[in-house]
């Protein structure tokens, strides 16, 4: 992958990324040591060439430190209802406190994903430790490649 | 506080998927979800290798991985730093995980998608709890008292000698000790190679006589493979025959009894009842609660299932040799009693009483044999020995589970509230009770007798 250039996400994918889907962030520390975090929602920019991921710096300080050091990021978006999953790879170009709109979006996302998971029998108090909004930062993520990761025949294919 | 893998046992129950992150040679991270992670010892975990090619390549290029696991009881998250060691494609670790995966696949109908290629063994270099705004409940909070409960259940049936009493005592004691929801005991019928429900608790109906084929669903898989299978979150479970409403019409049409099911069951566990190298049946428990059965419960229930198998085997052996009584002739009077229409189909030995399906196979053959002896010689008392040695019955030999078949027949007659009943006189002896005059119509011979 990795042409180094950004890309424009299609409308369907862009709206999927803003749905209440599970968002996992992968980064790496020096020496290629992998790290995992959860994001508290995504907001697309109008031109669909970048998105902002909200991540709790309080809960996931290693991830924030990795991104400040090397900017490489991968994020997986997975819908609990059918496991439809996309993996986006790219670069973080800015790390900043969320705008009021982004903060509101994160609050709404955290409530909605809690409801979705509750619909699958996972009580809100069980998913609460994954839905943390303390010290949120907005990561500006410029995707360079998208992979379909839904289990099945097309898994792993570049989109 | 230093954490150990042992304390994270609940994270490896396969309830909430684990997340793995690897990094390739070019420094790009890759994320994948894992359905199964198992603790091998205090320093190693095994990951189910259903990896997409990217993860497999990353592991070869860079053996370091990050794993996020979740305790399904409180949602607490833990981060493990891993170093890849090797992938195994056979052996006990692989077999165990492959069986777990088959069980999961059978439930969600994804048998082809979820095929295990190998178990990727990793050394755990580091382990820490992920910060949470909520205080995690101590892991000990879920440790039950499986041992005392097991003792109570085994005590309840260990001194019983008659098969029906053993089954009833075990079902009642399991319900009292585990308070889970519903229970079934199924015994293997070697003649038809299936598991037949002999008793149950907690369902709307008994389901006595319902069959499960080896390999079918959790029960069939456990019976076929001889291993315990546990599901802790069956929210996506597709239960075989769950939508089938049990009715007499349906039984008559299919000549079979529908397996009972617990609506909204979230936890299920099936345990093989094996003794002396032979699987005699399956013990099955289910509950509407998530995580109703812990790993400790599984161990306790596995031992109960083994004890139950031994008690049943002993009861079969003891009942085998009772000698026949002198027959008491009680020739039935055709005039005085109401007629009972009994139809027998020879091809599957299915028996219908007053147009209602009763039973098929060897128990059906035995009932017809008894009714014919009653009609021709007035015989009402029968011993296991004479049934076993009667050549016309073509019983499959000493290991034919005659007690099981007689109990099944007796219980099914009771379930259907039939005008024909079997009463147990003493060990190995039974009495036929007919409230009327049976008209037996069998296509085995030319017609009615």
Image: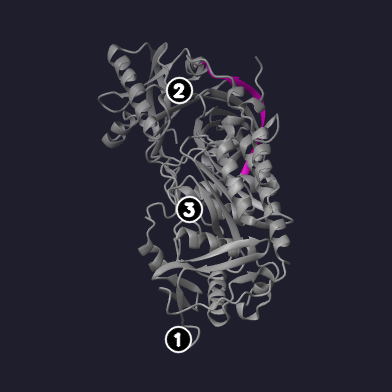
Q: CA distance from mark 3 to mark 1?
A: 34 Å
Q: Which mark is residue A130?
A: 2
Horizontally, residue B385 falls left or right of residue A11, namely: right
Locate residue B416, reporting x and y percent: 44, 61
Q: CA distance from mark 2 to mark 1?
A: 72 Å
Residue denoted by label 1: B447
Instruction: Establish if A50 lies above or below B433.
Output: above
Confirm whether the magenta stretch covers residue B132.
no
| Whether residue A57 is visible | yes
Density class for disc 3 (Cα within 10 Å; few <14, some 14-19, many ≥20) is some
Q: CA distance from mark 2 to mark 3?
A: 43 Å
Residue denoted by label 3: B206
Confirm whether the magenta stretch covers residue B128.
yes
Locate residue A75, reporting x and y percent: 43, 29
Chain bearing mark 1: B
Cβ–Cβ under 8 Å for marks 2 and 1: no
- First of labels 3, 1 by sequence position: 3
Magenta stretch in the rendered image: B119-131
Horizontally, residue B271 falls left or right of residue A102, namely: right
Locate residue B400, reporting x and y percent: 66, 67
Density class for disc 1 (Cα within 10 Å; few <14, some 14-19, many ≥20) is few
Question: Do marks 2 and 1 share a chain?
Answer: no
Give SS at disc 1. Answer: loop
Give SS at disc 3. Answer: loop
Q: Residue shown at 61%/32% (left/top)?
A: B62
Question: Do marks 2 and 3 share a chain?
Answer: no
| Whether residue B98 is visible | no
């Amino acid at each position: 992958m990795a042409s180094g250039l950004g890309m424009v996400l299609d409308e369907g994918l862009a709206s999927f990324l803003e749905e209440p889907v599970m968002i996992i962030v992968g980064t790496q520390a020096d020496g290629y040591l992998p790290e995992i975090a959860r994001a508290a929602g995504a907001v697309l920019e109008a031109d669909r060439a970048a998105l902002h991921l909200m991540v709790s710096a309080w809960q996931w300080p290693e991830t924030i430190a990795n991104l400040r050091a090397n900017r490489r990021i991968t994020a997986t978006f997975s819908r609990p209802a059918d496991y439809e999953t996309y993996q986006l790879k790219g670069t973080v170009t800015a790390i900043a406190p969320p705008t009021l709109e982004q903060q509101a979006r994160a609050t709404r996302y955290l409530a909605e994903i809690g409801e979705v998971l509750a619909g699958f029998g996972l009580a809100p108090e069980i998913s609460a430790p994954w839905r943390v909004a303390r010290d949120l930062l907005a990561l500006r993520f410029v995707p360079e490649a998208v992979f379909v990761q839904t289990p099945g025949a097309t898994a792993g294919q570049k989109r | 506080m230093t954490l150990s893998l042992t304390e994270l046992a609940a994270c490896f129950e396969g309830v909430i998927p684990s997340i793995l992150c690897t990094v390739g040679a070019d420094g790009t991270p890759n994320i994948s979800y894992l359905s199964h992670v198992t603790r091998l010892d205090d320093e190693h975990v095994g990951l189910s290798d259903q990896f997409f090619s990217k993860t497999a390549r990353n592991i070869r290029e860079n053996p370091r991985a990050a794993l996020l696991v979740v305790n399904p009881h409180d949602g607490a998250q833990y981060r493990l730093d891993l170093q890849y060691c090797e992938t195994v494609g056979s052996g006990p670790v692989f077999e165990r995980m492959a069986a777990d995966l088959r069980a999961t696949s059978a439930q969600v109908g994804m048998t082809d998608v979820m095929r295990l290629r190998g178990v990727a063994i990793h050394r755990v270099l580091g382990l820490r709890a992920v910060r949470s705004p909520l205080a995690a409940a101590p892991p000990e909070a879920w440790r039950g008292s499986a041992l005392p409960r097991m003792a109570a259940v085994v005590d309840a049936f260990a001194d019983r000698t008659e098969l029906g009493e053993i089954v009833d005592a075990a079902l009642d004691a399991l319900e009292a000790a585990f308070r889970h929801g519903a229970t079934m005991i199924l015994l293997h019928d070697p003649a038809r190679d299936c598991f037949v429900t002999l008793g149950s608790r907690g369902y709307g109906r008994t389901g006595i006589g319902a069959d499960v084929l080896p390999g079918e669903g959790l029960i069939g898989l456990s019976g076929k493979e001889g291993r315990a299978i546990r599901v802790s979150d069956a929210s996506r479970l597709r239960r075989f025959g769950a939508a089938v409403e049990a009715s007499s019409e349906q039984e008559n049409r299919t000549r079979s009894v529908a397996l009972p099911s617990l609506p909204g069951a979230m936890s299920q566990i099936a345990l093989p009842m094996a003794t002396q190298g032979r699987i005699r049946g399956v013990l099955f428990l289910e509950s509407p609660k998530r995580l109703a059965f812990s790993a400790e419960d599984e161990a306790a229930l596995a031992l109960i299932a083994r004890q139950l198998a031994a008690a049943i085997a002993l009861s079969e052996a003891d009942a085998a040799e009772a000698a026949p009584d002198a027959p008491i002739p009680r020739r039935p009077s055709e005039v005085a009693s109401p007629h009972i229409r009994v139809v027998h189909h020879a091809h599957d030995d299915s028996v219908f009483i007053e147009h209602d399906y009763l039973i098929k196979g060897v128990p059906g053959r035995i009932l017809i044999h008894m009714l014919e002896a009653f009609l021709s010689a007035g015989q009402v008392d029968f011993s296991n020995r004479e049934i076993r040695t009667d050549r016309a019955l073509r019983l499959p030999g000493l290991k034919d589970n005659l007690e099981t078949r007689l109990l099944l027949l007796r219980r099914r007659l009771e379930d259907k509230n039939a005008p024909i009943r079997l009463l147990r006189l003493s060990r190995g002896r039974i009495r036929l009770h007919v409230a009327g005059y049976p008209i037996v119509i069998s296509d085995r011979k030319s017609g009615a007798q």
